[in-house]
Amino acid sequence: MDKFVELTRVSKHFDTKKGRFQALADVNLSIARGEFVSLIGHSGCGKSTVLNLIAGLLEPNEGGLICNGREIDGPGPERAVVFQNHSLLPWMTCYGNVHLAVEKVFGGKENKAQLKARSEAALNMVGLGHAMHKHPNEISGGMKQRVGIARALAMQPKVLLMDEPFGALDALTRAHLQDELLRIVGETHSTVVMVTHDVDEAVLLSDRIVMMTNGPAATVGEILEVELPRPRDRLALANDARYHEYRTAVLEFLYQRQRRPAA
């Protein structure tokens, strides 16, 4: 496998008022170029910590992380993050929020017309060309999240990191954005790492599902290969026996871990 992102014996602890909390211990994970990987597990199992380590927002206490052959030693435009909270600047339009990121990454390499075209293309890709001049308070929660995705994609990252991007949305909006993400990833062939609590979301979107053990000292418990052909259609998968087998395998892992006392 092409080891595009690699975590080797990664451990992370946090010093709190109650003492040292060991969030992760000996995490080993390789992610191939163009692969969609979901991290799933119970609350407190270190999923977001893994994501933040790949993003360079945290540093490991032990072990190392590599992206595209280079050590991850801080944030960088080759790794874009989409958070559950869209984190849009309220005084800027949708276009302004995307253009700010584009200008930061490509400002020294492209002229104003090229930056404008890049910003508009990203918004059109997520179906928001009609709303690019609206402010965040003028659009729905699902549309705000699409702007966040557009902003990340506009940076042309080597890795798209998503921390429960649809967790705060209603079921119908979430399903629509999942389908949009499937389409976008199919077009861009992006490498994606996504944190989720949603088993169906993980099976629908992923090439592999990384199931984390309970914390403290959480680590990779099992990795499930999802061998469903792409492009994927949620209605067709509803009657697909393999889809239900994958779903059951994840639920069994989570249920067994839930019943076991924390290590």
Image (spheres, rainbow, N blue to C red):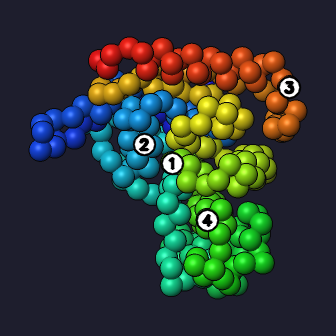
Q: Is residue 32 visible?
A: no
Residue identifier under label 1: 163
Q: What residue sits 68% from the left and 21% below the top?
A: 246
| 228 horizontally vs 144: left or right | right
| 186 horizontally vs 251: left or right | right
Q: Earlier in the sequence, mark 3 or mark 4?
A: 4
Q: How many labels does the image show?
A: 4
Q: What residue sits 12% from the left and 39% below the top?
A: 18
- Neighbor class of circle 1 (other Cα within 10 Å; few <14, some 14-19, many 20+) is many
Q: Earlier in the sequence, mark 3 or mark 2?
A: 2
Q: Which of marks 2 and 4 is in front?
A: 4
Type of the residue with mark 1: Asp
Residue identifier under label 2: 48
Type of the residue with mark 3: Asn
Q: What element carries label 2?
A: helix
Q: Do the residues labelled 2 and 1 touch (CB within 8 Å)?
A: yes
Type of the residue with mark 2: Ser
Q: What residue sits 73% from the left and 51% below the top?
A: 172
Q: Is residue 234 visible?
A: yes
Q: Nearer the viewer, residue 73 or 177?
A: 177
Determine the CA span between mark 1 and mark 3.
Answer: 29 Å
Relative image position of residue 193 (x, y in whole percent): 56, 41
Residue identifier under label 3: 239
Q: Earlier in the sequence, mark 4 or mark 1?
A: 4
Q: Which of marks 1 and 3 is nearer the N terminus?
A: 1
| 196 horizontally vs 124: left or right | left
Relative image position of residue 62 (x, y in whole percent): 27, 32
Decide: is 190 above or below 248: below
Determine the CA span between mark 2 and mark 4.
Answer: 22 Å
Residue identifier under label 4: 141
